[in-house]
Amino acid sequence: METSGPSLKSRIEELEKEEIVKALKECNWVMARAAKSLGITERMIGYKINKYGLRVKEVRWTEGAAEEHKTGNERKEPH
């Protein structure tokens, strides 16, 4: 049996990561609020953040890079 594309497990993990990032952004990166909005515990969201290596600066930079790519504008990170 041949498989094509990403596995179900990797697709589920990507969806979970996207939903966690979305919840964190909506809650200004307050883990307790984001966890509550997702219906999971603070401990679980902390585990998932570590599992996926999520960091505020990296997520914001990724968004800025995506916007920069779309518009062709250069964006610099504040020090």
Image (spheres, helix red, strand yellow):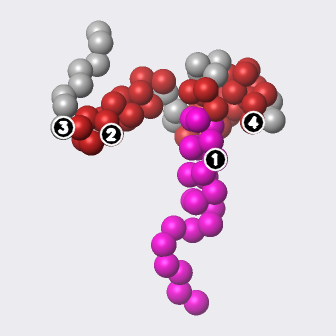
Instruction: Compare marks 4 and 1 and give the one earlier in the sequence.
Output: 1
x, y percentage for residue 35?
74, 29
Q: CA distance from mark 4 to mark 2?
A: 26 Å
Q: Main secondary structure of the magenta part?
A: helix
**Dot in front, 2 or 3:** 3
| Local secondary structure at mark 1 | helix
| Residue 19 part of the magenta-drawn span | yes
**Amino acid at pointer 3:** Gly
Q: Can residue 48 be seen?
A: yes
| Quadrant into which the N terminus falls | bottom right
Task: Name the residue that disc number 4 marks.
Answer: 38
Instruction: Compare marks 3 and 4 and give the one earlier in the sequence.
Output: 4
| Residue 72 disc label | 3
**Amino acid at pointer 1:** Glu
x, y percentage for residue 11?
58, 60
**Amino acid at pointer 2:** Ala
Within 10 Å of the Cα at label 2, are there few (<14), some (14-19), or many (20+) other Cα atoms?
A: few
| Residue 66 disc label | 2
Instruction: Compare marks 2 and 3 and give the one earlier in the sequence.
Output: 2
Please give the name of the residue rendered at 42% of the width and 23% of the height, measured from the top-left corner.
57
